[in-house]
Amino acid sequence: MNFPDDFTWGVATSSYQIEGAAHTDGRGPSIWDTFSYTPGKVVGGEHGDVACDHYNRYPQDVALMKDLGVQAYRFSIAWPRLYPQGDAQREQRGFDFYSRLIDELLNAGITPVPTLYHWDLPQANHDRGGWANRDIVGQFADYAAASATEFGDRAKKIITLNEPWCYTWLGHMSGVHAPGMEDLDFSIATAHHSVLAHAEATRAMRAVHSDIESGITLNMTNFRVAEGSNPEVYDLAALQDAHINRWWIESQLHGVYPQILVDHYGDKLARVIKDGDMDIAKIDSEFLGINYYSDSFLSNPAESDKPAEDGGPFPFPQRASGQVPEPTTDMGWPITPDGLYDLLMRIERDWPEFKEVSITENGAAYPEGIDADGEVHDERRVEYIRDHIAAVIRAAEDGSKIRSYFGWSFMDNFEWAEGYAKRFGLVHVDFETQVRTPKDSAKAYAAIIASNGAVLASVGR
Ligand code: FCB
């Protein structure tokens, strides 16, 4: 058995999805506040003003994590709490909140793992051109350095960007996420500046504390092409793989973008790359974070799925666009634990440079609420996490450098454009009363943690 004894078991959340307190202690507005308040953007017109009220309830939330035996907590820092206007003007009360949270975690024996950017860009920053304005690279590096200065004595593992593919393409091209734009040039600039921002933030943090471990978190997937598909479907799969997986990895490891995308975007990409940029992009990261939910399925595409002749608008690899195998979760995403194993083995094969791999999110949306017995019997989530953790353990035994797993999410929260109806929590949240109730899945996860995976085979059976 190669499964490490010191494997780390965690849970994950993000700032806008749980904190609430949107106008407290000098926090500035973010693009998600603006987007949520734009009619028609979020299901039910919901927003993160209160969310799980974690800003006020963090001591109880940390205590609950401790009860469950959680060993690490991945949360995100809201940039607009630290820099309400996205410039040099600091808000000390924002820094103080995360400092208190980190101390609370450490006192509970839980390792804090902050993410610097989980999508809540200061609105003021977006108003100055956002991710398409190259200035963001330096601003993000400054914000990273300040975070390293304040928190890096206690938080040694820091994630720079969460799922840059999502905010690049869903935020600026399909417009289903904040800031709700549909602009190919803006998207391409965002993708490039994000690559530079990860690298420069990593350098900036290392300059403050040389022992900080920095990595990016990507929403990775395998593209499965249905048998009997036309050759063009295989081409589409290659193009989508380059967008979602290879772009972010090969730029940091080798200082290049996948040739298929260089060709696909031509001048549109060439004009945002300045001399020397690819040297800046190249950086060794201590780890690679992966958010894995499901594989993506492609079959002969509908017209709307085909890349346009001029390179845009581009077809977005949603998690599934072909025939989706049943059953699916409440998000309509197929359940493909073998895909997680295959992905981890691919990383080992294609990009062995990563010293460590972490599953920074994995989980499922299911609607189960509190039953007559006062409990939440979410058997399907129990099975989902069991089967995905089994894939992680199998990959570790087969040589993957996977060292940690974070369940998404610690508790039900604001699921972006889907509002509060999609529940990903291991812990149930009653959004009227803010009462937290650990679901059966939380109890199953607690048993998995306590045994370092040994009880897995008996979970949910
Ligand atoms: C990921 C996001 C996370 C959460 C899950 C379900 O794409 O990083 O915030 O919404 O999906």
Image: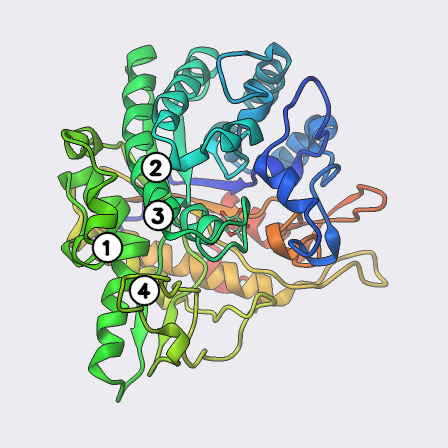
The structure residue drawn at horizontal position 85% and vertical position 43%, both measured from the top left corner, is 433
How much space separates mark 2 and mark 1, taking CA atoms? Answer: 17 Å
Instruction: Say if disc 1 is inside 8 Å of ligand 1.
Output: no
> Helix, strand or loop at disc 2?
helix
Residue 222, labelled with which disc?
4
Instruction: Say if disc 2 is inside 8 Å of ligand 1.
Output: no
> Helix, strand or loop at disc 1?
helix
Q: Is residue 43 left or right of residue 196?
A: right
How much space separates mark 3 and mark 4, taking CA atoms? Answer: 27 Å
Q: Earlier in the sequence, mark 2 or mark 1?
A: 2
How much space separates mark 2 and mark 4, taking CA atoms? Answer: 22 Å
Q: Quadrant of residue 190?
A: top left
> Helix, strand or loop at disc 4?
loop
Closer to us: 154 or 181 = 181
The residue to which callout 2 is attached is 194
Judged by depth in the image, the label closer to the viewer, 2 or 4, is 2
How much space separates mark 1 and mark 3, taking CA atoms? Answer: 10 Å
User: The disc labelled 4 sits on which kind of residue?
Assistant: Asn
Q: Are marks 2 and 3 in contact (CB under 8 Å)?
A: no
Q: Earlier in the sequence, mark 3 or mark 4?
A: 3
Q: Position of residue 434 (x, y in %)?
A: 80, 41
Q: Earlier in the sequence, mark 1 or mark 3?
A: 3
Q: Position of residue 307 (x, y in %)?
A: 31, 69
User: The disc labelled 3 sits on which kind of residue?
Assistant: Asp
The residue to which callout 3 is attached is 185
The residue to which callout 1 is attached is 265
How much space separates mark 2 and mark 3, taking CA atoms? Answer: 14 Å
